[in-house]
Each structure stands twice: as structure tokens, then as C-alpha cells.
Amino acid sequence: MKRIIRLMLRMCGLIVLGVALLGVVISQPTFRTNNLSGESVSAEKLKEHVVMLSQTFHPRDGSHPENMGRCADYIVAHFARAGAVVESQAIHFQGRQYRNVIGRFRVGQGPKVIVGAHYDSCGDTPGADDNASGVAALIELAYLLQKTPPGQEVELVAYANEEPPFYKTDQMGSAVHAKSIKGQKIKGVIVLEMVGYFRDERGSQQYPSGVLKAWYPNRGNFIGVVGAADQGEWINAVKVGMKGATDLPVYSIRAPAMLPGIDLSDHASYWPHKIPAVMITDTAFYRNEAYHALEDTADRLDYSRMSKVVVAVSAALRTL
């Protein structure tokens, strides 16, 4: 009997050890952090961008190309004002034309880092968090790059056509962009996908698997760095670059694409081209119950913490 008990204890110990090791691989815990950043971003400016995109240019989906064009013009104007070298990348679909907006800083200065965010929304939804928040962050990131030029080339891309009916097709804006940079020297890609919704209540953060609750917070008060299982180095580099730049907690996850949520944005468009790419996110529907709903409005976002996301991404760009 004692032998059986010892065997069971050993098996339990192996299971616990296995779960712990899996947690280390997936969450990549680290004590390394960046220095506290001296940069700042106006919460009011972020809100202005979100209101413009989610209200003034509403609806901004594929069936309203005129509003999509107005969004693109708005982004072009801000990129140009921030001193970027700006160009548009045309996308043709069923007789309609859409475009990615590209803003480059320090052109030709070594392997570049790409930061992107899609500016369309799902159907008739306002899409304040999804993804006016990401575009607002991208615009304000451009102004930070103007104030303190990066040590390498940084390419900002506002993507058209992330949402249905384009999602995971060749007409997806990020798919078009990923194909166009094939052969270029790219360090990696950072995609901003829903970065403005935060919750402090216990139980406000959900996960695609219950086991993840053992390694991650149950409050939706952090920002996540999400990537594929084979891209641990890039995931960790981005996370370390963001951690400590502000007081906003930063967590990461590296997991197979089959885990729900891991590949649900523009970053996945770069994986077939062997380009490392991560998603910076508030975790979308695992936290924000207004995902793809009419309730995804500008008044629900936390612009103060959203500004910290922008500062953290800017700080990471200085270290990558």
C-alpha cells in the first residue's frame, strides 16, 4: 500500500512539474525590464482620434469605401504632420479600392521594425476598441518617433480590410503588406489590436483555457503580448522592452495558433513569410464584452492606460 501511495505521489509531482514547466514556456516569466520612460502621450488626443474614427467616420467597413477613404486621409495627414515618409498601398476588391497607409521613419537605417493596426471596423459597429484604439495609438506613436527618432527604420502601417469579408483572404490589408515586403530585412512586426479597454474588478479577465488562470491575472488591468509558439524570442524581446517603461503590467503568451485568440489579427499575416510578428492587445473578447457589438463606443475606453501602452511600445522600439 505504501508503495502505491509513493507511486501516486511521484506521479502527482511529475504532473505538477510538467504543468509548471508548461507555464514557464507559455508565459515566459522574466525579471528583466526596461527603464522608466520619460515620454508621455495625451489621453485627450487619443480620445479625439477614437471619436473621429468611431463616430465621425462611422460606419467604416468594406461596404462603405468612402468612409474608409476618409479614415485613410485622416491617418495620412497625421503621419505627414509627424514627419513620416508617407505612401499608400492600393487594394482592389470587386470594383472597389481600399488602401493601406504607410509611414516610414529613418528610412534605410538597418533592418526595420513594423508596427501596424487595422482601421476598419466590423459591419455597422462603432469599433472604438476594435480597432480605433489601435489606430489612435499608432498615430500618437508617430508623434513620439518624431520627437525622438529611433535608431533604426520603423514602418508604421494602418491596414484596411482586417474584418469580414476580408479576414484571412488575400485582400486583407496586412496580407497585401506582408507579401509586398518579402525579401526585405525585417526584425519583426508589432500589431496593435484593441488596446484601450481595462477592468479592475476581480474575475473581469477570461482566457481560452481554464489552465491559463494559473499563470495570468484574473483582473483585466494589463496589456498582453501575443504570439505563436515558435516565436518566443521576438515575443520576449517586445515584452521586456515594454515592461517597466510605465507602471502598466505587461504579460505575454506564446502558444499554438490553434489556441483560440492567438492568431486573430493582422500579425498572423506575416507568419507564412517567416517574419516574427506579435499582437499587442487588451485581449479583446476575453475582457471586452462589447467586442463586435454596437456597444463598442468611445466612452468605454480608458485613455490614461491606453496612453501607457503607446509609451511602452515606443520604449520597446528603442531596445529592439
Image (cartoon, helix red, strand yellow):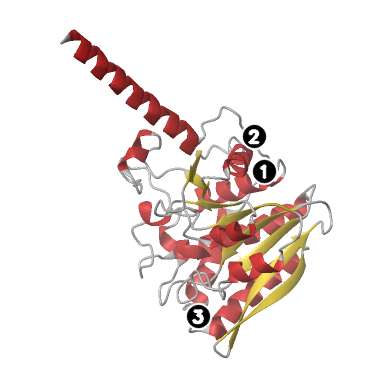
Question: Is 239 placed above or below 12 here?
Answer: below
Q: Nearer the viewer, residue 9 or 78?
A: 9
What amino acid does circle 1 point to? Ala
Quote the CA–CA distance across marks 1 and 2: 8 Å
Question: Is 162 placed above or below 204 here?
Answer: below
| Cβ atoms under marks 1 and 3 closer than 8 Å | no
Question: Residue lying furthest bottom in this view?
Answer: 95
For discs 1 and 3, the disc positioned in front in the rendered view = 3
What amino acid does circle 2 point to? Asn
At x 68% / y 40%, what residue is drawn? 38
Q: Position of residue 76 (x, y in %)?
A: 69, 72
The residue tagged with tag 3: helix, strand or loop?
loop
Quote the CA–CA distance across marks 1 and 3: 34 Å
Can residue 6 be seen by looking at this rendering?
A: yes
N-terminal label among 3 and 2? 2
Q: Which residue is mark 3?
A: 62
Question: Is 56 placed above or below 144 here?
Answer: below
Tell me the crowding category of disc 1: few under 14, some 14 to 19, or many 20 or more residues within 10 angstroms, Cα based: many
N-terminal label among 1 and 3? 3
Tell me the crowding category of disc 3: few under 14, some 14 to 19, or many 20 or more residues within 10 angstroms, Cα based: many
Q: Position of residue 171 (x, y in %)?
A: 56, 76
| Cβ atoms under marks 1 and 2 closer than 8 Å | yes
User: Residue 315 has which mark?
Assistant: 1
N-terminal label among 1 and 2? 2
Q: Position of residue 222 (x, y in %)?
A: 46, 43
Question: Is 1 placed above or below 225 here?
Answer: above
Q: Which residue is mark 2?
A: 34
Can residue 45 be seen by looking at this rendering?
A: no
Q: Position of residue 148 (x, y in %)?
A: 77, 49
For discs 3 and 2, the disc positioned in front in the rendered view = 3
